[in-house]
Amino acid sequence: MQVTATPVAEKVTPARAASPALPRANRVIPIPDFELDERLTAEQVDYLETYGFIRFKRFLPRERARALYQEVLEVDKQLVKDGREQVNGVPLIFGKRDDGTRYVQRIPFSSLQNEALHGFLQDRRFRGIIETAGPDYRIGEDERDGLVVNRFRNEPGAKYKRLGWHTDSLRDLFYFEKPRRYLNVGFYFTDSPLEVGGLRVLPCTHNQSIASLLTQKVHFVDDKPDENELAITAEAGDLTIHDGRIWHRTALATLQGDASERCVSYLPLMNGPLKRKSEKSATPAYFHLKRLVGY
């Protein structure tokens, strides 16, 4: 099946669009162009443990990232065609084009719906990432939300334009569990320069107390820039890891429409008891909270 779409990964920022200024933290904390081999090096582990995030350049060639993006569009098209509203109890988030047609902006369990995305997770380098997470960690392909694909767009019909400050550890509290180390592995299907918004983090906050986790910011409601935030930019094919305990948000793009799209997947690395999801799974309370604040 052939799917046509604007090749967002190849877009060039229009000259008339002013480039946002780098946050102050980017002038203080360097983001090296690390590359990932079979496993993380001692230097890379130190960087991740110190700052709570890391970026790897050219995890996959740009052409492979673009091919996987086309697979994402296939999943999107099938979900809309089937009239799906959720997958394994996790709600889908939809946007609307100018003509009223829907597209999916947040796709949970995407690798369970597409063989190419499932095959992507078989890359041997994920084993090395798991080793860094800990001896009892695993890829949560059918747990929590599985491999989530986010398509942030800045346009009138988009529901998913930005995401307020939050930590992924809040989810543990909703499951009545103590917040644990939770590494989020992000893969970029498209470019993510400052103009398309993108990931912002407060470096080193993965070492915060539970009290700080609950009170430093209002989860999802507060989306204002922080003077100490750091912008993580990336190109199609890059991979990032951030500790789920770190405060992070997704900034709003300054561009509009197709040029504003930022498509990235996030893979949870899990430990502890298996918590597999199925079509009979209920919607977690965590998502009811997100709906209350507009996500």
Image: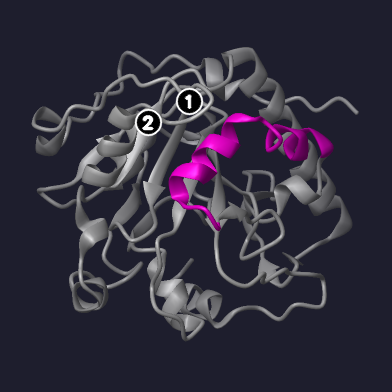
Whether residues under marks 1 and 2 lie with C-beta atoms below 8 angstroms apart, the answer is yes
**In the depicted structure, whether residue 2 falls above or below residue 290:** above
- Percent from the top left, x then y, of residue 222? 26, 65
**In the depicted structure, whether residue 118 falls above or below residue 162:** above
Outermost right residue: 1
Outermost front residue: 135
Mark 1, secondary structure of its residue: loop
Mark 2, secondary structure of its residue: strand
Q: Residue at x 83, y 61 (%)?
A: 83
- Quick check: is 34 in the magenta stretch? no
Q: CA distance from mark 1 to mark 2?
A: 7 Å
Query: Considering depth in this image, is 10 or 102 the residue closer to the camera?
Result: 10
Left or right? Give the position of 139 relative to 277. Answer: left
Q: Amino acid at mark 2?
A: Arg
Instruction: Look at the image and give the residue range highlighted in magenta.
Output: 115-136
Which badge, 1 or 2, is on the more N-terminal residue?
A: 2
Q: Residue at x 24, y 24 (%)?
A: 18
**For the residue carrying disc 1, how many other residues have a C-alpha within 10 Å: few (<14), some (14-19), or many (20+)?**
many
Query: Considering depth in this image, is 34 or 109 the residue closer to the camera?
Result: 34
- Percent from the top left, x then y, of residue 212? 19, 73
Left or right? Give the position of 34 relative to 82. Answer: left
Q: Amino acid at mark 1?
A: Asp
Quarter of the image with the N terminus is top right
Outermost bottom residue: 176
Q: Which mark is residue 55?
A: 2
Left or right? Give the position of 206 relative to 261. Answer: left
**In the depicted structure, whether residue 6 falls above or below residue 81:** above
- Percent from the top left, x then y, of residue 181? 40, 61
**For the residue carrying disc 2, how many other residues have a C-alpha within 10 Å: few (<14), some (14-19), or many (20+)?**
many
The answer to whether residue 155 is seen in the rendering is: no
The answer to whether residue 272 is seen in the rendering is: yes
Name the residue that disc number 1 marks: 238
